[in-house]
Amino acid sequence: MKPRERVLTALRREQPDRVPYDIEGFNREAFRMFKEKTGSDNPDEYFGVDKDVEWVGFKGTDLDLKKRFLRYHNLAENLVYSEGGAELEIPKPSSFRLNEWGTAFVVGSDVSYDHFVAPSVIVNAKSVRDIEEYPLPDFVSDYRHKHLEEDVKRIRERGLASVAEMSCTVFEVAWQIRGFDELLTDFLTRYDQAACLLDRITELSVFRAKRFAQAGVDIIHIGDDVGMEDRMLMSPATWKEWLKPRLEKVIRAAKEIKPDIVFSYHSDGYVEPIIPDFIEIGIDVLNPVQPECMDPAKLKREYGDKLAFWGTIGIQHTLPFGSPEDVEAEVKERIETVGKGGGLYLAPTHVIAPEVPHENIFALVNAVKKYGRYR
């Protein structure tokens, strides 16, 4: 099989010639260490990964983000965070970056990750008008997306499957703008403000999904993290009220244009209570299926006739702290259980961190090549 056919066969819950796979990306510190250690800037090539997919997306904005959004922030003062029930204060940032939604990112004590700083004006919003007047990205501008058809054509000519990146579809963008505690409080006490922000973000996600479908993209990767280690970030009822209908609107908009487009939904952590809802609104693939939070084999037994699974190799225990033999055993188990009859795209359940030995990445790739071919 060509890679594109292999990936789409697996994600449509049929049996391809072998299990498609990848090694995800590296977080920035792990990538810096990888380049320093190996002299390579191409992990797929270095570890011998058989490339099956290529990602596409909108081009970056031409707007001067700092000029556009600085007036919505107060980054001249110390920043206060709540963590574990206690308030933590860090010095005012000497440097930070802004994304196109206006969220500031300040490097944390772990150089691989950032603190998310919501724009102070919106954190303190008192009315729907405050939310309505906040500027959102210029996705509808032609220069952001006119390249998509050509990119998809090029990927298909290479025999690969095209995957559109649209994670942080509604909820994560909303809380990064409004503030996490503030948005969840809005759900309970400021209905109109919450609905206004979510609806504005949803309309932009609908537009992007439609453009990806029009361009002929094979797979759209959406999602918002709504799971923790052993429970959800919010009640299933809250998710169903606020997020389910908006995600369904995004999915329906793309499938009306391209009915066979595959939707993959990403959420870290435990999301079992809403898996039937994912299926109901048109999700075809669940990602990343952390084995520390949910049993991949159990999910395959219960939902394998309706869902495919992308991920399943643990990044909390096996990859960073297991031996190469442990990694091989986990890959073999996933292929024999979740991959039985198709329906598995095997990958780590998060980006590679500095703690993951390179020997374990080689072990993952070699194990897929050893056990991943269907008879």
Image (cartoon, rainbow, N blue to C red):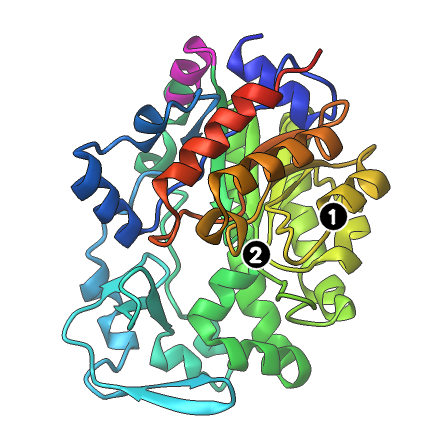
Amino acid type at image mark 1:
Phe
Q: Which residues are magenta?
A: 151-159
Tell which of 363 and 46 is nearer to you.
363
Q: Are marks 1 and 2 in contact (CB under 8 Å)?
A: no
Can residue 209 be seen here?
Answer: no
Measure how far apart labels 1 and 2 are at the Cα level: 12 Å
Residue 84 in percent (x, y) is at 50, 85
The residue that label 1 is drawn on is 278
Where, quadrant-wise, is the C terminus in this rendering? top right
Q: Residue at point 33% right, 63% down? A: 113
Tell which of 27 and 104 is nearer to you.
27
Q: Dot 2 surroundings within 10 Å: few (below 14), some, or many (20 or more)?
A: some
Q: Is residue 254 above or below residue 230?
A: above
| Residue 330, image quadrant | top right
Q: Residue at point 68% right, 82% down? A: 188
Asked if residue 109 lies in the magenta stretch, the reply is no
Q: Is residue 21 above or below residue 323?
A: above
3 left or right of 358 in image: right
Q: Residue at point 36% right, 49% down? A: 138
User: Which SS type dominates the magenta stretch?
Assistant: helix
Residue 318's label in the rendered image is none
Determine the secondary structure under disc 1: helix
Where, quadrant-wise, is the N terminus in this rendering? top right
